[in-house]
Amino acid sequence: MTPLEPAFRALLVTALMILVGVPPTLLAAVLPVLRRRGVETTTVRRIALLFVGPSLVAAVVSVTTLTALKWEPSVAGVDTGVFVSAALGTEPGIVWLVQATLGLGLIALTVAVARDTRWVTQRRWLATVTAGSLTMLAVFCWTRYSTAVSSRELAVFVKWVHMTGAALWVGGLFVMARLSSFFPEESDADLDAIVAAFIRRFSLLAVAGVTIAFVTGILITSWHVPSVDALLTTPYGLVVVAKVGLVLGAAGLGGFNRLVLHGLIQGTDDRRSREALPGLLVLDRRFRARDAVRSFVTAVRVELAVLVVALLASVVLTAVFQPSYTVVDIAPRQVFLTAAGSAASNVLFFSPLVQPLSTWFAEMLQLGAIAVAIVGSLALGYELGEFGAHRR
């Protein structure tokens, strides 16, 4: 492996996180609130182009470079016939062709939007980018999946769901970090209400994404780390510990943003505020709306920075280190899908789906995944209730 491969893989994963997470956040959390309150959405289009355009270019360049690094020297030569044969006759070539075609198509659509072409609306463009990016992510997962399980389709699906959930969280935070740019200075009178509505809508996506990412991440860890010793003594396990610590820290900060700063934003008035942490935490519930937004955005950027470091740790985890089960004397588990005679049995449950190792650690991880799913469902139910109450 050349040093370029982890770098371009990190660039590709970051680009896909932005492409999968930013458009849904704009569609579900930003545009409805601004249009409902009659605020101009031109800035949203500009910010969307700023995120989507460079990310698409980075994705196409990264996937092309990663594919070229894996091809034989003869394939990467100037012989057009050999190049076409490799692109159409090998799995890496087909994967590159699909991703590059999707990326170039989305780039062309984005250029049309940037030139203010009337035949494609902002909503259709964002929806198309979301669909295309999810497809690109699925193709990415098709060649970079867990080999610890016997079913390739299951491994690819779990990784795709895991990365999609993470993208809803990370990509949405990129949008929230630009929150102050979405409205002009003269909208200060309604700023607290607008931002509070943003946060409630984004929280629905974030809680769903965090829950999905945590549950599938725990499941993947149970595949790759067979014991506590493997977790604490192998390089893969130690990086997993570091990544989990970063993600939990970011989740805790996200909870603080949602439960504390969101509540403060809803209670703003013109009185001057007092800060417990400079630029971050305001103690007095009555303060200027724009100060509240500034505090929230600062906290979001800290959360985003922690998650970006965790994202880089994930890339190092998959690109550099071997899973722990490959360096300890424990065979990987076998995963299978049970056949059933009714449509209702197509629902996947952890118990019939995964045959755990004969160790308590894997069993505890899988029980932990179920517990996280339950807690996440309750949190999502709370967010839905909050959203419905304020919408009425």
Image (cartoon, rainbow, N blue to C red):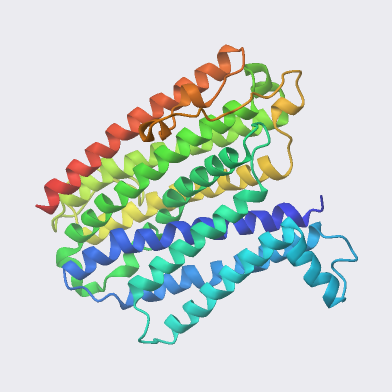
The residue sitting at the right extreme is 74
Corner quadrant of residue 330: top right
What's the residue at 51%, 22% (across, down)? Answer: 365
**Depth check, front residue: 243 or 165:** 165
264 on left or right of 101: left
Q: Is residue 201 left or right of residue 391?
A: right
Q: Tag count in the figure?
A: 0
Q: Nearer the viewer, residue 40 or 350?
A: 350
Give the quarter of the image for residue 87: bottom right
The part of the image, by quadrant, that contains residue 122 is bottom left
Residue 230, above or below 40: above
Q: Which residue of the protein is positioned furthest toward the front in this rendering?
A: 341
On screen, 116 above or below 162?
below
Look at 40% across and 76% down and name the residue there: 46
Q: Percent position (x, y) of residue 281?
A: 31, 45
Q: Is residue 180 visible?
A: yes
Residue 277 percent coordinates (x, y): 35, 44
Q: Is residue 306 visible?
A: no
Taking the view exactly as shown, the residue that stands out farthest to the left is: 392
Q: Compared to 354, does 22 lie above or below?
A: below
Residue 361 in percent (x, y) is at 57, 16
Nearest the viewer among 302 and 367 is 367
Point out residue 209 in the picture as x, y percentages from the top left corner.
40, 45
